[in-house]
Amino acid sequence: NAGVTQTPKFRILKIGQSMTLQCAQDMNHNYMYWYRQDPGMGLKLIYYSVGAGITDKGEVPNGYNVSRSTTEDFPLRLELAAPSQTSVYFCASEPDRWFSDEQFFGPGTRLTVL
Amino acid sequence: AQKVTQAQTEISVVEKEDVTLDCVYETRDTTYYLFWYKQPPSGELVFLIRRNSFDEQNEISGRYSWNFQKSTSSFNFTITASQVVDSAVYFCALSNTGGFKTIFGAGTRLFVKA
């Protein structure tokens, strides 16, 4: 298993540009999450998904969009990038909270908006 | 409103010392989840434990142990006989009843000196 993979690892965007951060998992997990981590801070939940076709907002969804057309993929779209979106983005997945006690994180995408 | 407080910003210990990281939480939910995560200097995120609010039993995993006390709204993490490899930022987190909207504390940076 590759686990949770994220691409790209690093990206520099200009203000107003758009991009998609890719996240994929090969563990057949239903639950997937996008977090952002600002320097020296804890993580903040952007969006989450409980299965293909089902997504919901987290704590800081403004400026982002997600889709979940398959169990494996959970891309995060940034529209009109702003300097406030400079952060490290982590994708995570987990199978089922009632029957499993594990969470898996991707390696992160470091995004800088200039 | 939910809140997680990790009052210790940084802790420095010498190898083989025991160290306890404090976590105090606030929630109005009667059912919730509590978590601990580790973020080593390399930047990846490692899931350590999830506890649901029904289970106040202490947990031990090797040199790690967790003390959950609902009466004081605390979920403290102890590392016994610390090692240099334990140097990391440790985050405590709280999820709501649905279990998906997670709030993180600001983290405690642990330095273990040889």
Image (cartoon, coloured by chain):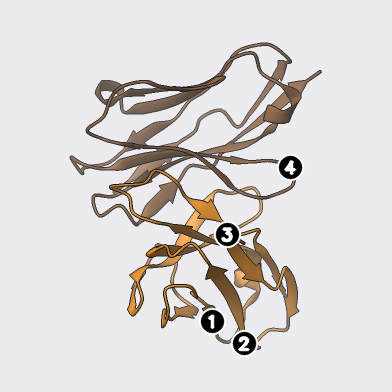
- The residue sitting at 60% across, 59% down in the picture is A106
Q: Are marks 1 and 4 in contact (CB under 8 Å)?
A: no
Task: Name the subunit of mark 3.
Answer: A
Q: Are marks 1 and 3 in contact (CB under 8 Å)?
A: no
* Within-10-Å neighbours for mark 1: few <14, some 14–19, many 20+: some
Distance from the alpha carbon under mark 3 to that under mark 4: 21 Å
* Within-10-Å neighbours for mark 2: few <14, some 14–19, many 20+: few
Asked which secondary structure carries label 4, the reply is loop
Checking the image for residue A3, the label placed there is 3
**Residue A114 vs residue B25: left or right?**
right
Of circles 3 and 4, the one toward us is 3
Distance from the alpha carbon under mark 1 to that under mark 4: 28 Å
Distance from the alpha carbon under mark 1 to that under mark 2: 7 Å
Q: Amino acid at mark 1?
A: Arg
Asked which secondary structure carries label 1, the reply is strand
Checking the image for residue B41, the label placed there is 4
Residue position for label 1? A77
Colour given to chain A in the rendered image: orange
Distance from the alpha carbon under mark 2 to that under mark 4: 30 Å
Q: Amino acid at mark 3?
A: Gly
Residue position for label 2? A18
- The residue sitting at 60% across, 71% down in the picture is A85
If you read the primary sequence from the N terminus, does the residue marked by circle 1 or circle 3 appear first?
3
**Is residue B15 or residue A113 the one in the foreground?**
B15
* Within-10-Å neighbours for mark 4: few <14, some 14–19, many 20+: few
**Residue B6 vs residue B69: left or right?**
right
Q: Are marks 1 and 2 in contact (CB under 8 Å)?
A: yes
If you read the primary sequence from the N terminus, does the residue marked by circle 2 or circle 3 appear first?
3
